[in-house]
Amino acid sequence: MALDWTPPRPGLGAWAVWRRNLRVWRKLIAPAVVLNFGEPTLYLLGLGFGLGAFIDTMNGMPYLAFLASGIIASSAMTTASFEGTYSVFTRMKVQRTYDAMLATPLALDDILMGEMLWCATKAAFSAAAILAVAGVLGVAGGWQALWALPVAFLIGLCFAGPALVVSAVSGNYDFFNYYFVLAVTPMLILCGVFYPIEGLPAAMQAAIQLLPLTHAVALARPLVAGLPVTDVALHVGVLMVYAVVGLYVALALTRRRLLV
Amino acid sequence: MTAVVRANDLVKCYGGFTAVDGISFDIPPARCIGVLGPNGAGKTTTLRMILGMTPMTAGSLEVFGLPMPAQGRAIRRRIGVVPQVDNLDPDFRVDENLEVHASYFGIDAATVRARLPALLAFANLSERRHAKTDTLSGGMKRRLTIARALINDPELVILDEPTTGLDPQARHVIWSRLMALRARGTTLLLTTHYMEEAERLCDELLIMDHGRMLDRGTPRALIRRHVEPEVIEVRSGDTADFADFAARHGCRLEAQGEGLSCYAEQSAPLLAYLQRHPALAYLHRPAGLEDVFLRLTGRDLRD
Ligand SMILES: Nc1ncnc2c1ncn2[C@@H]1O[C@H](COP(=O)(O)OP(=O)(O)O)[C@@H](O)[C@H]1O
Ligand SMILES: [Mg+2]
C-alpha cells in the first residue's frame, strides 16, 4: 500500500499520551530509580576510578568528568531507544493501547508525538540521575552542568525518531536486536563516550560526524565539565533533524501499519 | 430527523480483495441498529470506516452530518466504541482505565471524577473499581469496556460483537444495560452473531454478506419477507416419505445433516402426517431470524 506522507500535525492530545505513560511509570518508580541511579553509579565508580587511576586527564578534564559527561549522553540515547522500541511496540501491538486511543479524538500524529516526548522525558530523567551522582563525586563543573538536562531531553527526542521508525516496521521483539547491535551499540563504542574521537582514523572520524551520538556528546561534555560549548547550532541541528525526520517517517509507516 | 450515519456506496479493498463492496445505508437517531452477517462479511471493516480508523477505498460517509474522514476527530469526540477485541489498558486499574480514556477526549479530571460513580454503577463494577483489569472476568471486562465507551457521554455507541464469548448471565446483564442506553436516546449500532440478541435489542437489522447489504428491516418484517411462518424440523427417522408429502403440500425443504427442515405456510396437514408416523421425531416452531439469516447467507461454513 502507498504511504500517506501527510506531515505530522500533533495537537494537545500528545500530552494526554505523555501523561498516560507518566502515570504507568509512577507505579514502577522504585525499580526505575534503582536502575537509573544504580547503573551509572556502577559505571562511574568502576570505570571512572578504575581507569582513572591510569589516566590522569582526558581532553583537559579529569577522566571521571570525561566519562560522566559521555555517559549522560549515551544513557539518554539508550533510555530513549529502549522506550521507543520495546515499550512502544508493546503498546502498539501487544497491548493494543493505540487501537483504544485511535477510537478517540486522538490521531496517530498525537500518539507518536506523545511517545516521542515521553522518550525524551525518560532520557532527561536518566541524565538527571547521572548528573546527581556526578555532582556527589564532585566532577560537575558548576551550575552550568544543569544545561545537560534540556540537552538530554533533546537527545531523547533525537533517538526516539529512529526508534519509532524501527517499531513501525518491526514484527516482533527480536527485530530490535538488529537495531541495537547494528546502530545503538556501535554508537556507544565509537562516538566518544569513553575516549576522545580524535584518536580514531581520519576516515572514521568523518563518518561518525553523521551519527547523532557524536553531536550529543559534543554538547553534553563541555556543559557538564564547565567548559565553553562550540558549534551549538550544528549539534542541535543534527539532533533535531534525526528527531523530525524520524517522526515523519515513523508516522507514515505506522499509518500504513495501523490505519488499514 | 437527520440520520446519525449516512453511508453512500462505501467500498473497502485490501489489495485485490474487496471486503466491503459498495454499501449504502443510514442510521436514524435514537434507535438500535444491528448488523448481522457471517464471519468475514465486512461488519468490522464497515464500523472501522465509520470511525475513520480504516480509510475507505471509495464512496462517501457522513456522521452527525459531518464528512468522514475530514472531520474525524470531531466525529470521534461524539462516539463511544466497544471494539471486537478487548483493548483495556492492562497497566491500569478499573477506575484508572476510565480516567485515562477520558483524558484522550480532553475531559478534565474533576469532570471524570464526577462521572465515575455513575458509570461504575451502570457497569456493576463499583466494588471492583480498584481491581487490576487482568483480574476481571470476561463479562466484567466487557462491562468495563462499555463504561469506557460512555465516558464522553456519546450520542452514538458502536459495539462490535459485544457479547461474543460471554455466558448467558453476563449476556443478559449487557442486554439490559444496552436497553437502558437506548431508552436514554443514545443511538446504538452493533454487530452480532446471535439472532436472539438481534431480535431482542434491535429496532432494525442490516444483513450483510461478502461485503454487500442483502436486506434491511425490522426483525418481524425480515421474517415475513424471507421465510414461511412455520418450521417443522424432522430430526430422525426415515424422512424420505415425509419429504415427498411436504413437497406436495408446497413446503420448502432444506436438508440438514441427517435431518430436514420444512418451511410451511400451513403446518396442519404436516402435523397430522407426523401424528400418523410416530417414528419421526420432530420439532415444530415459528420461523425466526436464524431462518432468514441462513436463507440469505446460505449454510456453508465460514472461517
Ligand atoms: N487488514 C486486513 N487486511 C486484509 N484483509 C482484511 C483485513 N481486515 C479484514 N480483512 C478481510 O476483510 C473481510 C471482512 O473482514 P471483517 O470486516 O473483519 O469481517 P466481519 O467483522 O464481518 O467478520 C474478511 O475476509 C477479512 O479477512
Ligand atoms: Mg468482525
Image: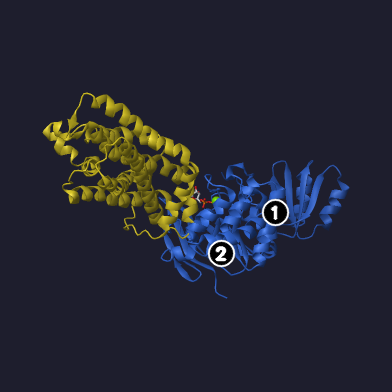
Give the amino acid type for the residue marked by disc 1 in the picture. Answer: Val
Chain with colour yellow in the figure: A
Which tint was used for chain B? blue
Disc 2 with disc 1 on a shared chain: yes
Q: Which residue is mark 1?
A: B173
User: x, y percentage for residue A160?
Assistant: 33, 46
The reply to whether residue B155 is in sight is: yes
Residue, x 21% and y 35% (percent of image)?
A192
Q: Chain of mark 1?
A: B
Q: Nearer the viewer, residue B17 or A72?
A: A72
Residue contact at pointers 2 and 1, CB within 8 angstroms: no
Q: Which residue is mark 2?
A: B154
For mark 1, does the 10 Å Cα neighbourhood hold few (<14), some (14 to 19), or many (20 or more) residues?
some
Residue at mark 2: C-beta within 8 A of ligand 2? no
Rendered-image quadrant of the C terminus of chain B:
top right
Q: Where on the picture, by quarter, is residue B219? A: bottom right
Find the residue positioned furthest to the right: B276
